[in-house]
Image: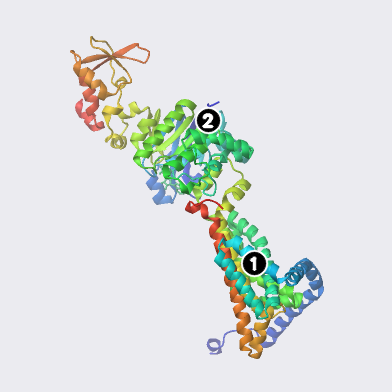
Amino acid sequence: MDFWTEIPSLGKRDLRDLKKGIDSAFRGFSREYGDNIEAFFDPLYYFLVWLEKLLIAAPWPIILFAVAGLSYLGSKSWKLALGSVLSFVVIGYFGMWKDMMATISLISVATIICIAIGIPVGILMSRYDRVQGAITPILDLMQTIPIFVYLLPVVMLLGIGRVPGLIAVCVYALPPVIRLTNLGIRLVDKEILEAADSFGSSYRQKLFDVQIPLALPNIFAGVNQTIMMALAMVVIASMIGVKGLGMPVLQAIQNQYLTLGLMNGLAIVALAIIFDRVSQRYGKRLQAHRYGKDHE
Amino acid sequence: MSDAKLQINNLYKIFGPKAKKFVPLVKEGISKQELLDSYNHVLGLNNINLTIPQQKVQVIMGLSGSGKSTLIRHINRLIEPTSGEVIVDNKNVLEMSQTELREFRRKKTSMVFQKFALLPHKTVSQNVAYGLTIQGVHEAQAKESSHIWIEKVGLSGFEGHFPAQLSGGMQQRVGLARALATDAPILLMDEAFSALDPLIRTDMQDILLDLQNELQKTIIFITHDLDEALRIGDNIAILRDGKVIQEGNPQEIIMTPADDYISDFIKDVNRGKVIRIKSIVTKGSCRGPNLISSLTLENALKELNKSKTKECNVIDEGGKKIGKVSLDSAIDALLKTNVSTNERYK
Ligand SMILES: Nc1ncnc2c1ncn2[C@@H]1O[C@H](COP(=O)(O)OP(=O)(O)O)[C@@H](O)[C@H]1O
Ligand SMILES: [Mg+2]
């Protein structure tokens, strides 16, 4: 009768031994190679710190000027540029300037890394069905696995700090660029590709002259999503020691500081809206030729 | 410059994962439907043998799904064959290495597509120069030579426009200029004008015929429109279920359709405008006036009717007598609408 009421399971002691075994093996691995792995990520650490310091040290009017310039260049909209500058002023006025700079530097570096890894991987996936078959489940895993589950081994390997935080953000934010690069290239009109082939294009010529330019709106939608997901990770990243707007939110949750939490939360939202609108407008302009408008 | 021998031998194409396995079955005569029903493979081309006349317009005609696109894509190998050969200048295109094939596509063939297939992110001038830039021609030079072709297709002033800013007809002119810009001797046109309105289509046919007069390319022109085929083609091949069921010059096809499928095809054609008296000429001579052999029935009828004997002599372009025609035979040719009535007459 036992058989029907109790699912067969490993004995308690066996289970404990198994967990212990794996844990100690990973700990051993971490002790052995942790330093090397950390050293491997050192350049990233220095870059991140350098950018953060640069942004914090720069006089605020220059930053505002850059914000205005970049958001105008991206969106070609005075309203958006003005809105961005105003948001920055307000965030600074309420004492969150430094945290905002730290968050911006984290998001920027994370986005650069995601693009640098994501676009080539997406291109490979679009070229080989097998690569697509192998990578798609990994992407699914990256997007569904609870963040804390992979946070743990990262922290065990690299400790607490900016780099593990950055890696966690990247793991979470990477899939959209990869997926949309792959999709964008695969969606390029077959007849246009035939035309490129019929004139004797090589694979490289086709890729850089036809496929990537035509996939750009999709690739850019992927970048946009990646930025949004990176921003969404800011609070969680602060749990493993990443400075920025997430840290006060975390504090606020732990100590029930309502105003602190709200202010920093709103600042994150403001950043998200600015990044989103500017990058979306930019993405739209990339396909202006489709609607018969002149190139800018 | 513009000559290349083009010959297709025993070409088979079967779509499906085990295509090669079914070639013997197809050779034994299994039908397209049977192959699909029993083995889930699609018969694309079935033993195509064609010698394409140099510097002429070869039309390939057939209903949708008859294998026209499949056939033309074998000539520049956008589709891999299941078996057979495509010989261009004594070389089998289907056996070329990737590098040879690229070189072949750059220098020997160019293609015009049904839905234009222009590069939407490039300007008219960049589109026309595309083939040249692929060959590594310097941008300034490519732009300069593309300009000539833009002018020839009547698009001067639109160099900086994007395809989306142009009408369908204008877009296909860009497609044509792009194909001509590489100076390739073989021009492949897959239903190039089918997507255009009738009036614009006639315009494009005129442009093509004018250019062909000057350039003398070997053109493979696909269409499902008989009027277009008769207007452009020096030679016509008719495809059905991946097989060539008749091949010949337009007169032959109209006068002696090989089967009901083709009779059906040609039943709506305006015979008076299409058939020329050289197709009904008989031996002998008469006392009537001389008519030139390329005269259409429509025009010949008037002359024949005026002639006292209801007969006229036929001369060729050089003025040499080649025979005679009678009013009766002209009316006969005008009325024979298909094979079956043809038989009833006898
Ligand atoms: N990639 C493919 N896979 C399977 N069947 C195909 C493929 N391409 C074409 N076919 C089939 O081959 C036949 C000929 O097609 P196609 O050459 O496109 O005809 P057409 O251009 O005359 O309309 C059709 O029955 C079509 O369904
Ligand atoms: Mg077709």
Which quadrant holds residue B213? top left
Query: Circle 1 sits on which residue?
Result: A67
Is A220 in front, or is B325?
A220
The amino acid type of the residue labelled 2 equals Pro
Asked if one can make out residue A75 in the rendered structure from this viewpoint, the answer is: yes
x and y percent of residue B311 in the render? Answer: 22, 15
Chain letter of mark 1 equals: A
Q: Are marks 2 and 1 in contact (CB under 8 Å)?
A: no
Q: Which mark is residue B185?
A: 2
Which quadrant holds residue A246? bottom right
The amino acid type of the residue labelled 1 equals Val
Give the residue at x 38% y 28%. B248
Disc 2 to disc 1, C-alpha distance: 56 Å
Q: Is residue B120 depicted above or below B74 in this figure?
A: below
Asked if one can make out residue A137 in the rendered structure from this viewpoint, the answer is: no
Give the residue at x 65% y 57%. A120
Q: Is residue A16 depicted above or below B172 in this figure?
A: below
Q: Is residue B280 left or right of residue B208?
A: left
Q: How is the image coloured?
A: rainbow
x and y percent of residue B39 in the render? Answer: 43, 50
User: Which numbered mark, 2 or 1, is in the foreground of this view?
Assistant: 1
Circle 1 packing at 10 Å, graded few (<14), some (14-19), many (20+), is some
Kind of element beneath mark 1 = helix
Q: Is residue B212 left or right of residue A277?
A: left
Q: Is residue B8 depicted above or below A79 in this figure?
A: above
x and y percent of residue A287 in the render? Answer: 53, 55
Chain letter of mark 2 equals: B
